[in-house]
């Protein structure tokens, strides 16, 4: 099996601002695997806080020798071996995982949601994300979110009332809040959550720094709203220890090394009584379509990453009436767009 990779910059429609940084583009690495005339596509999206870059991804991908594995269907041998090549590099590992899943699905002639026995009619609604910004831009983004049933808003400790108030001046739709570890004092966090509960907020994502699990458990015991782990939940080994600390987890392919581990995390979370959100970075429709294959198992989806960029290279899963809609194409369901005549 041949492995190819190429860097790509995802250009954002708006500057993306969260509690700790701002950016106008996200570096990505596009991956292809090919054998028997079939090509599988994968993607590593690498926002700065993930700790990866095109350089680190390329260095890791050069270590991957798929020729060692004569049967690409043997994911239970291939993917653990790739994971063991080096620590970290979760987005680069996810790119290979996604590409292999895409190749297998294409070879079998079926999308992964069907191979997993999932009902594509049972996908959840997806939220539209609004980052930290001026009131004018927040109003503009809220109007752009008109086709979506839920709005996700990024907050920090200083702008929460402005952000929520501005959104509420435009719409009364349900809102989910992502604090991005921005609240460090548990008493202050509780006060904020009690106010947010009066504003039509559904849940709070990662209210406190990832390592402050004792404070988060204290907060959960008193919070009127569910708490969802994001930065505190990276991989399968994190899931069990979060029961009793959070009410649910946010699973992202770029954090957990791809579809194989995401499926395991989702299954374990369900067994532990945890709610599940499927999330994303800023990604093309390649990685979004891969994550969407799992969406019939999730309570919520936050799969708007491809909608936030100007230069998507793929067509795939779409949002219809606010819901994730899965294509019936084989593999992950994404197809590469043809280059425009001007390129």
Image (spheres, rainbow, N blue to C red):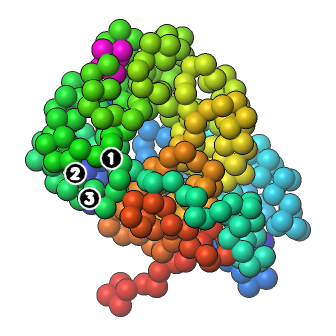
Q: Is residue 31 visible?
A: no
Identify the main secondary structure in magenta: helix
CA gap, disc 3 and disc 2: 7 Å
Neighbourhood count class around disc 3 (C-alpha, 10 Å): few under 14, some 14–19, many 20 upward: some
Q: Residue 307: percent from the left, percent from the top?
A: 37, 62
Instruction: Answer with left or right where residue 323 lies relative to residue 64.
Output: left
Instruction: Answer with left or right where residue 115 lies relative to residue 48.
Output: right
The answer to which of 280 and 20 lies nearer the viewer is 280
Q: Residue 14: percent from the left, percent from the top?
A: 24, 55
Specify the segment rendered in magenta. 189-193
Neighbourhood count class around disc 2 (C-alpha, 10 Å): few under 14, some 14–19, many 20 upward: many
The answer to which of 92 and 299 lies nearer the viewer is 299
The residue shown at (61%, 19%) is 244
Q: Residue lying farthest bottom? A: 341
Question: Looking at the rendering, which quadrant does residue 87 occupy?
Answer: top right
Instruction: Answer with left or right where residue 169 lies relative to residue 320.
Output: left
CA gap, disc 2 and disc 1: 8 Å
Answer with mark 3 or mark 1, whichever residue precedes in sequence: 3
Helix, strand or loop for disc 1 = strand
Neighbourhood count class around disc 1 (C-alpha, 10 Å): few under 14, some 14–19, many 20 upward: many
Image disc number at residue 151: 1
Quadrant housing the C terminus: bottom left
Q: Are marks 2 and 1 in contact (CB under 8 Å)?
A: yes
The answer to which of 2 and 216 lies nearer the viewer is 216
Q: Residue lying farthest right? A: 70
Helix, strand or loop for disc 2 = helix
CA gap, disc 3 and disc 1: 9 Å
Image disc number at residue 317: none
Answer with mark 2 or mark 1, whichever residue precedes in sequence: 2
* Residue carrying label 2: 142
* Residue carrying label 3: 146
Question: Looking at the rendering, which quadrant does residue 36 occupy?
Answer: bottom right
């Amino acid at each position: 099996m041949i492995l190819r990779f190429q860097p790509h910059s995802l250009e954002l429609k708006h500057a993306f601002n969260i509690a700790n940084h701002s950016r106008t583009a996200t570096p990505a690495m596009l991956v292809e695997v090919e054998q028997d005339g079939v090509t599988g596509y994968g993607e590593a999206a690498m926002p700065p806080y993930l700790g990866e870059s095109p350089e680190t991804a390329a260095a890791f991908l050069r270590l991957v020798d798929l020729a060692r594995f004569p049967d690409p269907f043997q994911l239970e041998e291939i993917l653990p071996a790739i994971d063991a090549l080096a620590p970290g590099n979760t987005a680069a590992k996810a790119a290979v995982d996604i590409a292999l899943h895409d190749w297998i699905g294409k070879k079998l002639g079926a999308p992964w949601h069907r191979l997993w026995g999932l009902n594509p009619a049972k996908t959840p609604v997806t939220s539209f994300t609004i980052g930290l910004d001026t009131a004018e831009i927040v109003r503009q983004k809220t109007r752009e979110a008109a086709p979506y049933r839920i709005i996700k808003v990024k907050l920090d400790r200083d702008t929460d009332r402005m952000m929520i108030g501005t959104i509420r001046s435009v719409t009364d739709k349900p809102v989910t809040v992502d604090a991005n570890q921005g609240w460090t004092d548990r008493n202050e966090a509780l006060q904020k959550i009690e106010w947010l509960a009066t504003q039509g907020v559904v849940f709070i994502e990662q209210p406190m720094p990832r390592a402050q699990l004792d404070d988060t458990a204290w907060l959960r015991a008193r919070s009127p709203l569910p708490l969802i782990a994001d930065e505190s939940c990276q991989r399968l080994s994190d899931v069990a220890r979060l029961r009793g600390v959070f009410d649910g987890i946010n699973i992202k392919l770029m954090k957990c090394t791809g579809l194989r581990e995401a499926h395991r995390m989702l299954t374990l979370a369900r067994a532990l009584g945890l709610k599940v959100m499927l999330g994303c970075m800023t990604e093309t429709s390649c990685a979004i379509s891969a994550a969407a294959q799992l969406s019939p198992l999730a309570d919520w989806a936050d799969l708007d990453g491809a909608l936030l960029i100007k230069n998507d290279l793929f067509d795939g899963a779409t949002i219809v009436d606010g819901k994730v809609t899965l294509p019936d194409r084989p593999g992950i369901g994404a197809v590469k767009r043809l280059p425009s005549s001007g390129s």
